[in-house]
Amino acid sequence: MIVLPKRVYERARSVPPDRLPLSVYDLPLIDEHVRRLRADLPPEVELHVALPYVADPDLLAVLGPHVDGFTAQPGSAAAAEPGGVPLTLSGTGKSLAEIAEVAAHKGTCVEVESPEELHLAGHTARAAGRTLDVLLRVDPPLRPGSAAGPAAPSSGMDAASLVACADAVRSGAPTRPVGFSVRLPPGGGGGATAAEHADGLLRALRPWSAMFGIESARYAIVGGTVNVPGGADDGTGFDWAGYGAGLAALARPGETVRVTPEGTPASWAGWLLAQVLDVRHNYGRAVAVVALSERAPGSRQPAVVARDDDVSWGRPWQRPDLRGEPVTLLGKGAHDHVLAHDVPLPSIRPGDIVAFPPGDPG
């Protein structure tokens, strides 16, 4: 069974149930990850980190000295208070209010994913009396005249949408396109293979930089995994040093290339704590219901922390207990929301805490 870090275990034993679910970060481990990432990348390649929706100030303090910027989701606490680090608002479905919240801070940038979002950014900038920097989020391929697109629609724009954005910029919208954001293809391989993909992306994007009149373009590339504890340690992890060296060689004078690893620090070294609501058998199969409504199943098995205080269990009837058998964990609300299959646990009871480890989708 997975072993919890001492700080995570102590937090799971003491957190009030009304504070759950709760993300708990192993800050020293996050510091180690981000230091290693920064050391692997050449100085000319910028490092940005995607923040979780709720970003603790201590987390920002650990990350800040090692990164060149953050990306934040619309409506998140980090988007409202970036803490002095350059911040990019990224994610689908941005509202006018969310863009205005970010535009209130200096050094911020909005990643626009449609002509409509560009119009929203321009309206916000005009109301604030400033020019707002924007990154244009794109989906490859981007060669003019190319009809083929990604295997499935995703965030970002095709060539026709980029042309519409160029028309909006030329019409006098108070936005300043500074570059493009793009994601590496899924399963992009190791460092050398990812650098090859990046080369193709940059070649496709440069003509669009010229079209928008961007002289010193920024190219923000999302992709590459951060190895987590218990993950691959056999040399098969993502080669950040090789990838960074390849990117540095690709950049032309005046260009800025930046990378944003997949996931947030919550998926590198963050534990998600949630309370057990119910346990039972169903046709001989052990089932526990956990107070967690939105979480995809992960590849690593969670741990259970026993809670014997009156707050966790103060009912007058006998506390049910599943012992020494594989347990399937279900999320709250949806009958088919399986969080984890057949987890071998010594014991699990209502009121106990399930700790989902780093490496699961966060």
Image (cartoon, helix red, strand yellow):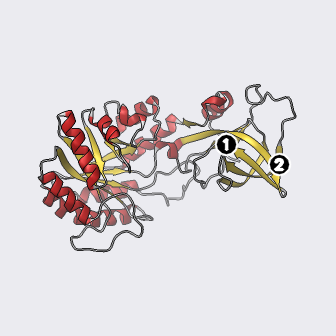
In this rendering, is residue 123 above or below 184?
A: above
Q: For mark 1, does the 10 Å Cα neighbourhood hold few (<14), some (14 to 19), or many (20 or more) residues?
A: few
Q: Please tell me whether mark 2 sits on a helix, a strand or a loop.
A: strand
In this rendering, is residue 336 above or below 133?
A: below
* Quarter-of-image position of residue 205: bottom left
**Relative horizontal placement of residue 233, taking residue 90 as reference (left or right):** right
* Image position, residue 201 (x, y; %): 28, 64
Q: Which residue is mark 1?
A: 3
* Quarter-of-image position of residue 143: bottom left
Q: Nearer the viewer, mark 1 or mark 2?
A: 2
Res 236 label? none
* Image position, residue 255 (x, y; %): 19, 53
In this rendering, is residue 9 above or below 323?
A: above
Residue at 67%, 46% in the rendered image: 2
Q: Please tell me whether mark 1 sits on a helix, a strand or a loop.
A: loop
* Image position, residue 213 (x, y; %): 12, 55
Residue at 73%, 26% in the rendered image: 311
**Relative horizontal placement of residue 234, taking residue 102 as reference (left or right):** right
Q: Can you name the residue that lies furthest to the top here?
A: 310
In this rendering, is residue 319 above or below 142?
A: above
The foreground one among 29 and 234 is 29
Q: Earlier in the sequence, mark 1 or mark 2?
A: 1
Tell me the amino acid under the disc marked 1: Val
Q: Is residue 215 visible?
A: no
**Mark 1 and 2 residues: CB-CB less than 8 Å, in contact?**
no
* Label 1 – label 2 distance at C-alpha: 17 Å
Tell me the amino acid under the disc marked 2: Gly
The foreground one among 146 and 45 is 146
Q: Which residue is mark 2?
A: 324
**Relative horizontal placement of residue 359, taking residue 116 as reference (left or right):** right
* Quarter-of-image position of residue 199: bottom left
